[in-house]
Amino acid sequence: MQKLLETIPELSECDKVTGEDCFIIRLHLRAIEHLDFILERITDKAETHSSIVKSQPVARRLPAF
């Protein structure tokens, strides 16, 4: 799966996580319709769950320690 994810140019972040999911990826797409094209490539190899970021209430920042 990791090798497949590395071939997706729209992928900007990929985290390997514990729990039910194995990876959380962040894609940057020009149009939401392009998501189907990306998912078709992945769903042959794995089950997927998609979420769309609506807003970012707390901006990404470095931890203060």
Image (cartoon, rainbow, N blue to C red):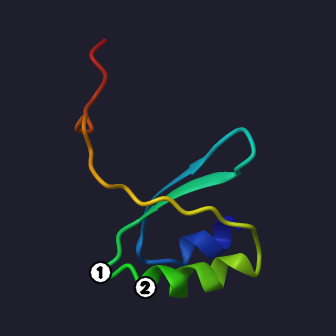
Residue visible at 27% across and 38% down? 60
Residue 7 horizontal/vertical position (percent): 55, 78
Mark 2 burial class by Cα count in 10 Å: few <14, some 14-19, many 20+: few
Position of 7 compared to 9: left or right? right
Residue assigned mark 2: 34
In the figure, 40 relative to 29: above or below?
below
Position of 31 compared to 21: left or right? left
Residue visible at 63% across and 54% down? 23
Location of residue 50 by image quarter: bottom right
Residue assigned mark 1: 30
Q: What element carries label 1?
A: loop
Location of residue 6 by image quarter: bottom right
Return the residue nearer the eye: 58 or 1. 58
The alpha-carbon separation of the residues under discs 1 and 2 comes to 7 Å
Residue 65 horizontal/vertical position (percent): 31, 11
Q: Are marks 1 and 2 in contact (CB under 8 Å)?
A: yes
Q: What amino acid type is highlighted by mark number 1?
A: Arg
Position of 62 compared to 36: left or right? left
Residue 24 horizontal/vertical position (percent): 56, 53
